[in-house]
Image (cartoon, rainbow, N blue to C red):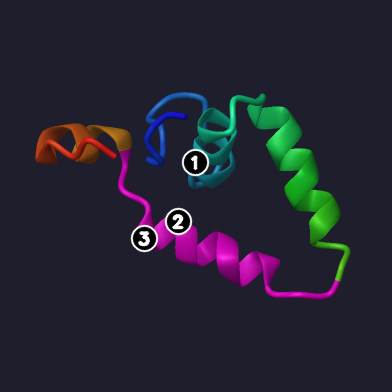
Amino acid sequence: MTALARPTDGRLLGGVCAALAKRFSTSATTMRVIFLVSCLLPGPQFLLYLALWILLPSEKSARAAGHAW
């Protein structure tokens, strides 16, 4: 598994789905579809997305800080 950081390339909005896809070795499109389908279910999916967008570092800032996640 790779580090959990929002990539600088291949992201549409905040890079959260792209980061999760990279972490779990799947395509970003698959992760986006899973997220959109999960939004049809009750729960805090959108709030979780926003929290991850805020909390996950960008790839370039993670590399600059020397994190080895």
Give coordinates of residue 21: x percent, y percent: 59, 33
In this rendering, is residue 1 above or below 52? above
Check whether the beta carbons of the residues at disc 2 and disc 3 lie within 8 A of each other.
yes
Check whether the beta carbons of the residues at disc 3 and disc 1 lie within 8 A of each other.
no
In this rendering, is residue 62 above or below 55? above
Tag 3: residue type?
Answer: Leu
13 vs 59, left or right, is right
What's the residue at 85%, 52% (across, down)?
37
Give coordinates of residue 43: x percent, y percent: 76, 75
Depth check, mark 3 against mark 1: the one in front is: 3
Question: What main secondary structure does the magenta stretch of the protein show?
Answer: helix
Tag 1: residue type?
Answer: Gly
For numbered disc 3, what is the local secondary structure? helix
In the rendered image, which residue does mark 3 sit on? 55
In the rendered image, which residue does mark 2 sit on? 53
Quadrant of residue 12 within the rendered picture: top right
Q: From which residue to which does the magenta span run?
A: 42-58
In the rendered image, which residue does mark 1 sit on? 15
Disc 2 from disc 3: Cα separation = 6 Å
What's the residue at 19%, 32% (across, down)?
63
Per the image, is 67 magenta? Answer: no
Disc 1 from disc 2: Cα separation = 7 Å
Instruction: Identify the image quadrant of the C terminus.
Output: top left
Check whether the beta carbons of the residues at disc 1 and disc 2 lie within 8 A of each other.
yes
Residue 33 image label: none
In this rendering, is residue 40 above or below 2? below
| Residue lying farthest to the front in this orientation | 1
Q: Earlier in the sequence, mark 1 or mark 2?
A: 1
Tag 2: residue type?
Answer: Trp
What's the residue at 37%, 30% (across, down)?
8
